[in-house]
Image (tube, rainbow, N blue to C red):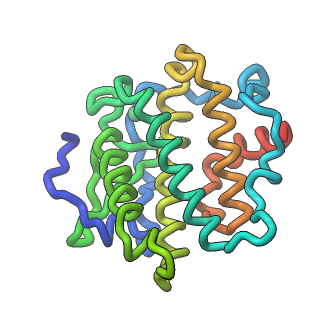
């Protein structure tokens, strides 16, 4: 299990207050150790499953509460990213992906409940991530569903953490599992989901520039298609 023996905390996991969890100096290992980034090729960048303008889809609709809009989209994006990563899960194993890495082979490390950084396999990292998000979404104190309930003070901060994990999940798929994505014919779906998510994050200031920088080449390429 990638050398990880501690179960992570549901409250401290992958805190954005620990930006050093990306060890840029160390290279990860995956099954796509190519210098090229095939997802940037014109034949793939232009593929979408809809031509709807993402800026229209992601903008706050008139009369809708901003936090409610953020919450409902958080739930929807989690379901889509989780479903998408499940479709590729058979290709993401401790042997194919012994480290959770993204573009440039940067390594994503999990933070356990003692604040320790865990270098774990990609499937374990993303399993932690999805479990962490699932726990948040079902926590009535964080995502209230009852009439009259209010969102907690730190809701936006938690939403930022969720979107960072979702962004990294898709970044790992682009970086480590693009060949399988193409083989399954899912590249148009992946581009659409990634574009939708990054437009939403940009419109609502959910990701820091340093978080999106490793995927900026793709974001710019896809943006020109919108
Ligand atoms: Zn993987």
Q: How many marks?
A: 0
Quarter of the figure that contains the N terminus? top left
Quarter of the figure that contains the C terminus? top right
Q: Position of residue 103 (x, y in %)?
A: 55, 42
In the image, is residue 143 above or below residue 166?
Answer: below
In the image, is residue 225 above or below residue 139?
Answer: above
Q: Is 36 situated left or right of 10 in this image?
A: right
Task: State the residue lying farthest toward the top.
Answer: 183
Quarter location, residue 221: top right
Seen at 71% across and 61% down, the residue is 202
Q: Position of residue 35 (x, y in %)?
A: 58, 30
Task: State the residue lying farthest toward the bottom.
Answer: 153
Seen at 50% across and 81% down, the residue is 148
Q: Nearer the viewer, residue 136 or 208?
A: 136
Q: Position of residue 126 (x, y in %)?
A: 36, 46
Q: Is 186 situated left or right of 10 in this image?
A: right
Task: State the residue lying farthest toward the left.
Answer: 5
Q: Position of residue 81 (x, y in %)?
A: 50, 42
Q: Is 15 situated left or right of 6 in this image?
A: right
Seen at 35% across and 68% down, the residue is 139
In the image, is residue 170 above or below residue 119?
Answer: above
In this orientation, does residue 104 appear?
Answer: no
Q: Nearer the viewer, residue 192 or 214?
A: 192
Task: State the residue lying farthest toward the front.
Answer: 147
Seen at 73% across and 29% down, the residue is 48
Q: Quadrant of ligand 1?
A: top left
In this orientation, does residue 219 appear?
Answer: yes
Quarter location, residue 104: top right
């Amino acid at each position: 299990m990638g050398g990880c023996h501690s179960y992570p905390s549901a409250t401290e996991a992958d805190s954005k207050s620990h930006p050093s969890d990306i060890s840029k100096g160390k290279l990860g290992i995956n099954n796509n150790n190519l210098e090229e980034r095939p997802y940037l090729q014109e034949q793939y960048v232009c593929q979408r499953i809809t031509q709807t303008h993402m800026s229209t889809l992601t903008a706050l609709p008139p009369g809708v509460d901003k936090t409610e809009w953020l919450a409902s989209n958080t739930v929807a994006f989690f379901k889509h990213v989780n479903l998408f990563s499940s479709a590729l899960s058979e290709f993401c194993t401790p042997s194919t992906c012994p480290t959770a890495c993204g573009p440039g082979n940067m390594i994503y490390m999990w933070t356990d409940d003692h604040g320790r950084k865990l270098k774990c396999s990609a499937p374990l990292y993303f399993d932690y991530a999805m479990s962490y998000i699932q726990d948040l979404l079902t926590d009535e104190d964080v995502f209230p569903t009852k009439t009259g309930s209010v969102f907690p003070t730190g809701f936006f901060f938690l939403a930022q953490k969720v979107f960072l994990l979702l962004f990294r999940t898709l970044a790992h798929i682009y970086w480590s599992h693009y060949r399988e994505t193409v083989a399954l014919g899912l590249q148009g779906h992946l581009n659409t989901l990634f574009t939708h998510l990054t437009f939403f994050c940009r419109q609502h200031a959910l990701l820091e520039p340093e978080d999106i920088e490793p995927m900026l080449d793709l974001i710019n390429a896809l943006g020109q298609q919108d």
